[in-house]
Amino acid sequence: MQRTEISSLGEFVFIEHLTKDFKPKNKSTETSIGDDAAVLNYGEEKRVLVTTDMLLEGIHFDLVYCPLKHLGYKAAVVNFSDIYAMFGTPAQLTVSIGVSKRFSVEDIEELYAGIRLACDLYNVDLIGGDTCASMTGLTLSLTCIGEANPEEIVYRKGAQPTDLICVSGNLGASYMGLQLLEREKRVFDGDKDFVPAFEGHEYILERQLKPEARKDIVESLKKANIKPTSMMDISDGLSSELLHISQNSHVGIRIYEDRLPIDYQTASMAEQMNLNVTTVALNGGEDYELLFTVPLAMHDLVADIDDIHIIGHITAPELGAALVTRDGAEIRLRAQGWNAFNEN
Amino acid sequence: MQRTEISSLGEFVFIEHLTKDFKPKNKSTETSIGDDAAVLNYGEEKRVLVTTDMLLEGIHFDLVYCPLKHLGYKAAVVNFSDIYAMFGTPAQLTVSIGVSKRFSVEDIEELYAGIRLACDLYNVDLIGGDTCASMTGLTLSLTCIGEANPEEIVYRKGAQPTDLICVSGNLGASYMGLQLLEREKRVFDGDKDFVPAFEGHEYILERQLKPEARKDIVESLKKANIKPTSMMDISDGLSSELLHISQNSHVGIRIYEDRLPIDYQTASMAEQMNLNVTTVALNGGEDYELLFTVPLAMHDLVADIDDIHIIGHITAPELGAALVTRDGAEIRLRAQGWNAFNEN
């Protein structure tokens, strides 16, 4: 029998490959696989949005530097982020956990304290889940259900040439926070008297350990009567997400290096570690910022909103997806984000 | 810091303990944790039902004797079963998988072929999921979304004294199938020429490896205009589920040993293995049959439906939950079902 390594396909091709033969059969399934969340039609007034995430110890988190309460908070928030990225409102959450004997009741209480904090802040209800023993480590699987008016949902597919490309907040901070944590973990290596060098890096650490979903940006856009033409959240890195918009909307992309919003702490840590900060901003991932497009005519409206940055514009599809560097060169965008199945 | 072992609480107390401080905040959250599925209110006409299950290699399945296609089928079907147990109809499914390098693309295709077969047979749409690398083995987490008219949903809480207690199909077959698989695995133990002794045991093996959800029973009940007063599916064992009904409905339980439906293959395998077949039927689990109660007046209507068995009746709460043995003795029901966190 043939044996194809999963790493030879990459995550998105693999998912596409596995799911291509599943055809929707129910009237209530309005939009299925391929966006931040699925859209279900269970009545006239509202649409139900569904998104899910799995988090595995040793792959997505390292409990050496990720406190369980933070992990719970982050696991919940990254799901809420997917619902906001559809321009919806998260409302319910299921949490399934697999727990090995290494963990005590108090440990898992900490995890749930983080989930509860996130649920309280984002007004989401825990409605169920599954709790089971695991042979090895901690496994988390969360599913978030949200709601939206049918006419307000924003997909990845609506971007049009000349639309402005916007991102909220700044990019690469979470990735640099992770690099710092990994470095200090290596330095530590069992030394009991070791004090990690975290001072002055609080912001990038917080972006990695306790990210927020951009509820505020969705609210600001709605208040300003701006409905983006396309939207998604940045979990795998800006490049990867822009390619999704390009593919789903059948358009080209031009973003400008000098427009990428980067925090001072991100830039200085990248310099310290000899990393190109633009590469970090493009491919770091786990930003959980919103990436969206709006019609050019909305330039002034969007520019007025705090913490939104216009980084480029949509072009005709034949122009492809590219970054325009500071010196005017065009570099093709490639998804170098998290390939979880990569061999190295 | 205090350290309480999870095994000291047991699964249900543990879940209760973790979730007790989560209070519903959204109007759309109609029924939260504590039944086969949560009930969401997203409009006048329909209710949305949500259930989720996590399956971990080495805990819930053993790939030595569980083919991946069967595993996919079973993982989907056990979720559908929870939706039927609310008297609803499953409609959408998300599938998240964590996969180690041991698995090839072809392996996971097999898994999805099983999921697809289940989705086709039960008319359910795959709407999303997450695919990630895992350090060890295979991790599955599925969430099923279903629908029901508000007035037709059946909870665990509606049973009344004198109601008849019914189960579909028969009990203990899946458990005996598992015992047989485990025995043959031990006998096998690396012997290449080994031929497992499966002949004549096809039924119990199928019940373990490829269970079905009792869609047909729900349809028959609806057709006969019977709305059960309470209902759940039997995943942890009849005893454990009866105690849930007892607790949620605040009633007592009397079931009769000579009424328990047991298949010939189950009984003969139990005898071969020196197991008490009543214990197997009460505590085996993974039956995925429906357990429900109906008003006494519906006796004839229910008795007319194929493959439904009346095994006892509901009593006043102070009488507790008991099995009446063949010789008339009363034995208190105890949940000896799967305690996944048990030390032994």
Image (cartoon, coloured by chain):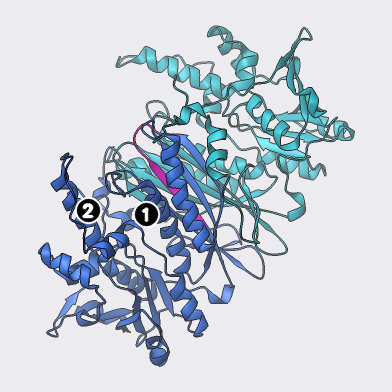
Chain colours: A blue, B cyan
The reply to the same-chain question for discs 1 and 2 is yes
Secondary structure under tag 2 reads: helix
- Say which of B323 and A61 sits in front: A61
Let me know if residue B291 appears in the view.
Answer: no
Note whether A176 is above or below B108 in the view shown: below
Badge 1: chain ID: A
Tag 1 residue: A15
Task: Label 1, secondary structure: give it.
Answer: helix
Residue indicated by mark 2: A181
Residue A143 colored in magenta in the image: yes
Query: Which sits in the foreground, B65 or B291?
Result: B291
Disc 2: host chain: A
Q: How crowded is mark 2: few (under 14 residues within 10 Å), some or many (20 or more)?
A: many
Stretch in magenta: A133-144
Q: Which amino acid does label 2 sit on?
A: Leu
- The vertical placement of B223 against A144, above or below, is above
- Give the residue drawn at x 54%, y 16%: B200
Q: Which residue is drawn at 54% across and 19% down?
A: B176
